[in-house]
Image: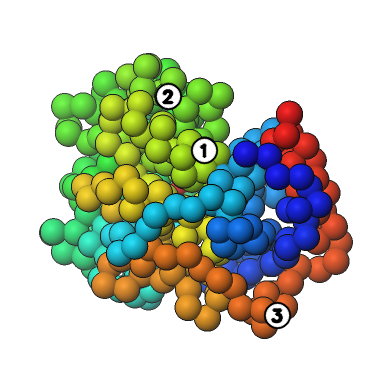
Amino acid sequence: MHIPFPELAASARVVSLPLRTRFRGIDVREAMLLRGPAGWTEFSPFVEYGDEEAAAWLRAAIDFGWSDHPGTGSVRVNATLPVVSVDRVPELLARFPGTRTVKVKVADPASTVAEDAARVGAVRRAIGPEGRIRVDANGAWTVDEAEHAIHAFAEHDLEYVEQPCATLDELAEIRRRVKYMGVPIAADESVRKAADPLAVVAAEAADILVLKVQPLGGIRAALRIAGQAGLPVVVSSALETSVGIAMGAHLAAQLGTEEYDAGLGTAALLAADVTSSPLLPRDGAIEVRRVEPDEDLIERHTAPPERQLWWMQRLERCAALVGE
Ligand SMILES: O=C(O)CCC(=O)C1=CC=C[C@@H](O)[C@@H]1C(=O)O
Ligand SMILES: [Mg+2]
């Protein structure tokens, strides 16, 4: 759907939210909020993304704000653990009450395999033998490094390894190498940053697909991809405000996947949100509902004027791309 730029710009607000702990190299999350006839929606491609890639995020924002989407109930979520020292693990997990699954970030330039393994071990001790642990390397390892790391983590029993390597060939190779260990490989960047999100399936490079609603162009687009994939899917966030998390929650609810907990608990990583009733994990789940931002919170966290201008110009360029 194409909405002319002036209509999008009319309701646009830009916020800048501090994170509690550094995550994916950022301490502040910038996001643009828009209000369509169906409710508030979010356009928040990471700032380093180019317009072509960001345009998919705008399609998603428009799909959610300008069409009705069914959604009630709740979806189970995982805790998301940034790269922190072992002694901080209990404090960070406490922000995700009731979650049975933890996603541990690994392969950060600031962390060795031994440190990653120690962090995974600390998570296992914290959540007990029934808990599920997935790790996410964001494509940082070579195939050999991935194999080494997966062996180092094996005693802690992994649910899956997300994007251990960057390319489809590497993913397919590491998948073959660790198959005997029963560790599934999940694809994230190979889905959300690929020209063809299903190429990873054709390459037999993954057992599970991670679906992020904004980069995939919205709820309907993500549902189509899930329908064609023929693999289990896990819905995950892109570190949105609660307004954008609601979009992911609606996708997860429509998919109805019970097997894998969604990576949608990340409002707990923000030190501030745009609503006084944020979509925070409670009893291991978040609610599925639309979120209305509070004017006073938007105002308190409004981005500086030069950042607002930057986002408005980005919105205009992306709206033009969506209209093409
Ligand atoms: O899946 C989760 O538990 C939370 C979301 C998450 O990990 C991510 C959100 C946004 C950007 C990414 O670096 C990261 C990911 O790679 O999955
Ligand atoms: Mg990931």
| Label 1 crowd (10 A; few <14 / some 14-19 / many >=20) | many
The quarter of the displayed image where residue 273 is located? bottom right
Q: Residue at x 26, y 23 (%)?
A: 177
Question: Element at badge 2?
Answer: loop
Q: Give the x, y percent position of residue 121.
A: 26, 57
The quarter of the displayed image where residue 17 is located? bottom right
| Amino acid at circle 3 | Arg
Q: Residue at x 34, y 27 (%)?
A: 229
Question: Element at badge 3?
Answer: helix
> Horizontally, is 144 left or right of 215 in the view?
left
| Amino acid at circle 1 | Leu
Q: Are marks 3 and 2 in contact (CB under 8 Å)?
A: no
Alpha carbon distance from label 3 to label 2? 41 Å
Q: Residue at x 41, y 31 (%)?
A: 225
Query: Which one is earlier in the sequence, the residue at label 3 or at label 2?
Result: 2
Residue on which the image places disc 2: 198
Query: Which one is earlier in the sequence, the residue at label 1 or at label 2?
Result: 2
Residue on which the image places disc 1: 216
Q: Residue at x 40, y 49 (%)?
A: 251
Q: Is residue 253 visible?
A: yes
Alpha carbon distance from label 1 to label 2? 11 Å
Residue closest to the eye, 239 or 315? 315
Q: Does 113 appear above or below 246?
A: above
Residue on which the image places disc 3: 300
Alpha carbon distance from label 1 to label 3? 31 Å
